[in-house]
Amino acid sequence: MPERAAGSGPPAVTLYVCSTCRLPDAPADAAPAGADLLAQVRAAGETDIVVREVKCLANCKRALSAALTHRDGWSYVFGDLSAEAADDLLAGARLFLTSTDGLLPWRGRPDALKRGMVARIPPLAPPAA
């Protein structure tokens, strides 16, 4: 996770990965595939994106799930991710870093983030003009 100076505000982009998500066809006693996805994302060593574990995104019918937030823009929830979606999530987060309008660009977005979009959530406060 990138280090930020005290009082520097929230990170530009945060990626939340649900660590309790289970694949729909997984046996009940199997380890959550979401925890594996989180480990893969963290292992990539991305320095410009904050990665956070979340215990549940309440998107169980479309697991595996993750969310992207932008401090000056929208938030996105994704589902139907594969256990190998770490590269797609990080590519989407890097693309989100380039946003000048607070939206995750459609062009260049990995297919998993096009097909798997569950919700786009408006900013809590309007972006600064």
Image (cartoon, grey):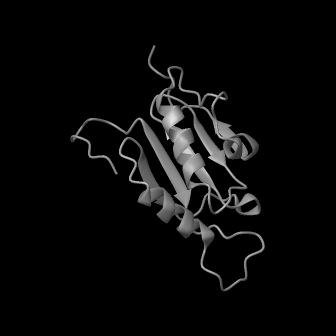
Q: How many marks?
A: 0
Residue 23, placed above or below residue 96:
below
Residue furthest to the bottom: 29
| Residue 2: image location, x then y, percent | 31, 46
Residue 22, placed above or below residue 74:
below
| Residue 47: image location, x then y, percent | 35, 45
Kindly tell me whether residue 16 is visible in this rendering.
yes
Q: Residue at position x 49%, y 37% from top?
A: 94
Is residue 27 shown left or right of residue 42? right
> Residue 113's image quarter?
top right
Looking at this view, is 68 or 84 the one in front? Answer: 84
Residue furthest to the top: 129
Residue 2, placed above or below residue 103:
below
Q: Residue at position x 55%, y 31% from top?
A: 123
Kindly tell me whether residue 19 is visible in this rendering.
no
Looking at this view, is 63 or 74 the one in front? Answer: 63
Q: Residue at position x 74%, y 58% from top?
A: 62
Residue 125, placed above or below residue 65:
above
Q: Residue at position x 72%, y 39% from top?
A: 114
| Residue 102: image location, x then y, percent | 53, 26
> Residue 20's image quarter?
bottom right
> Residue 106's image quarter?
top right
| Residue 12: image location, x then y, percent | 41, 35
Looking at this view, is 109 or 122 the one in front? Answer: 109
